[in-house]
Amino acid sequence: MHEALAMATLALLGDETPVGCVFVHDGKIIGRGMNATNRTYNGTRHAEFIAINDILSQKDPNGLPLYGPEILADCDLYVTVEPCIMCASLLRQIGIRRVYFGAQNEKFGGTGGVLNVHLGNGKRVLETDYRVDDGKDASKGRCVEGDYEVSGGWLREEAIVMLRRFYVQENERAPEPRSKKERILKLEVEPMIEGDNGC
Amino acid sequence: MDSERSKKGRLIPLKTTLEVEARDRVIDVYIASIPLRQASNALNTVRRLIPNDGGLDLQHLRRFSKPSHVPLHVQATIASVKSPASGTENAESEAGELLLVVGSVESISKETIIESLCSVHTPSAIIITQVPLLAPTSQEQATRFSSQYWPTVYKKSNPFGPHPSLISRAEEELAYEAPKWMALAVAVAQETRAAGTGEEIGVVVLRRHDGIATPVAVAGDMRWLNWPRFKTGNPAAHAVLRAIAMVADGLRRRKEDAQLAAATSATGLFRDEPRGELEQCDSVAGDDGYLCHDLEIYCTHEPCVMCAMAIVHSRFGRAVFGRRMPRTGGLCADGELGHGLFWRKELNWTLFAWQWNNENEDSTAQKGDEDLHA
Ligand SMILES: [Zn+2]
Ligand SMILES: [Zn+2]
């Protein structure tokens, strides 16, 4: 998670919304990504895409791809902000095992914030099915192909402060800085309301 | 031109999630049969009894209706509660009665109604019936409500989505050329399929200026290009994401030196370079920095959840797709997923979206294709 935060810091330094992530395979980081929407002029270049591209672009000494997409099934993703709906669907389609995130994404979140794409592609009826199921036999038997586990709140305060740092930075840059309140970095973070993000 | 026009079809505006949820919600209300001459007095009494209709908005319901204008089952219920005696007694005044929507059964009791309306005139019948809770969002819906529940008016407004007049204005602009752009999307889809590099899915991105549309990107699906036959292929090579990337790369090429963008190759995750004969990219981005701001996107299939959200992130203004994908699509609110991503109040961007219904083709996913993520 600290490595993901480091990637977010890097994004912040490049004037990008500070979201960073790492993919971990067998305890080793095999891919890193940070939000790159401004640099690429492409609003879909989120950290998750960049990191998967990083994994698949690595070459062995013979110039052949070091990893194929199948490796993702044995990877855990650590990302500073909850994956958005788009990325949650990407992770589902490409097949990830588990996601750990920091701050919840109330605006676009795809793994609990707005939709639950990690469970049955976000189908509403399924959600209740899962809840009923959980109580009875705590098994993950109901998971549909592509479903993955999600756990939120890891280094959440740090991730939120990072986002605030970005908004303050953006406002300072604006030709006419907005109200003073918006330029002051608030460091305390309200406690998290417990939500269920499990599979 | 004639061949274009012969490809008949029509644009069907998508329903929003709220619209779909609200579609068939009904409530029980009291209906009282009141002599015509006492109608306004009775309504005044009701207004005093239940201020603001108890917080409900009943503006879409005809407050008074002639008995002959309500659905037959309501007429039958009224006839059944009228005593035969009062029936003969009032035979001639029968025609002079109106049915009044008093209020929801939660807001008042039958006893109170009788008690208070007695001062005006004892209603010859009081019944309970179901009425639609929310205003209809189309004339068809209003007609259905009227024949099923109670006379209902369509006020050409939609509290659950874009205003109908805005949609129809946009539709007028799109309608004429829609077959042409859909045909181009189909052509690039066939090209990519023939090349074996992707599924038969295609996308056209247009920029409209003074009513004239020009393509800025044409892209096919490339999910199997340099990708193992594993799972569902490369999601980043879906036609929508490729089209968006082409617009971005075109812009970047303009803004920076050409080499940077040209360095993209078909390894790693991204497949952004135009490849086929039909694929093209001629990008001009909006001045506000948002890449696809108010551009139009035409897809052969309803985009998957990922691509639908990518369309929202990129701030497209209008989306049109051919085949509905109930199991995997992210735009429709009335599919199996029900996400309706084109218009959700939580998201910071909304756009107009239509399904292009081609008369000669089946417009929903076909057998074997239902689980395809477009
Ligand atoms: Zn994302
Ligand atoms: Zn897609």
Image: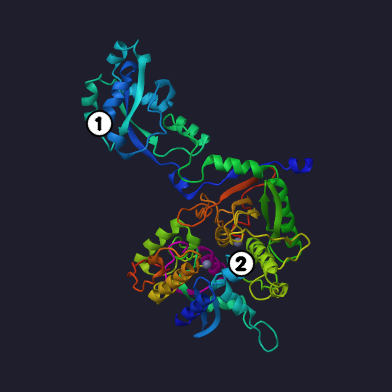
- Is label 1 on the same chain as label 2? no
Q: Horizontal and vertical percent for residue B70?
A: 42, 25
Spatial separation of the CA atoms under disc 1 and disc 2? 60 Å
Picture quadrant of ligand 2: bottom right
Q: Which residue is mark 1?
A: B49
Quarter holding the C terminus of chain B is: bottom right
Judge from the rendering whether residue A100 lies leftward or rightward of residue B217; answer left or right. Answer: left
Q: Quadrant of residue B116?
A: top left
- Find disc 2 in the rendering and name its residue: A41
- What residue type is disc 1 on? Leu
Image-quadrant location for residue B346? bottom left
Crowding at dot 2, Cα within 10 Å, few <14 / some 14-19 / many 20+, comes out as many
Residue A87 forms part of the magenta stretch: yes
- Label 2 amino acid? Tyr
- Element on which disc 1 rests: helix
Residue range in magenta is A85-109
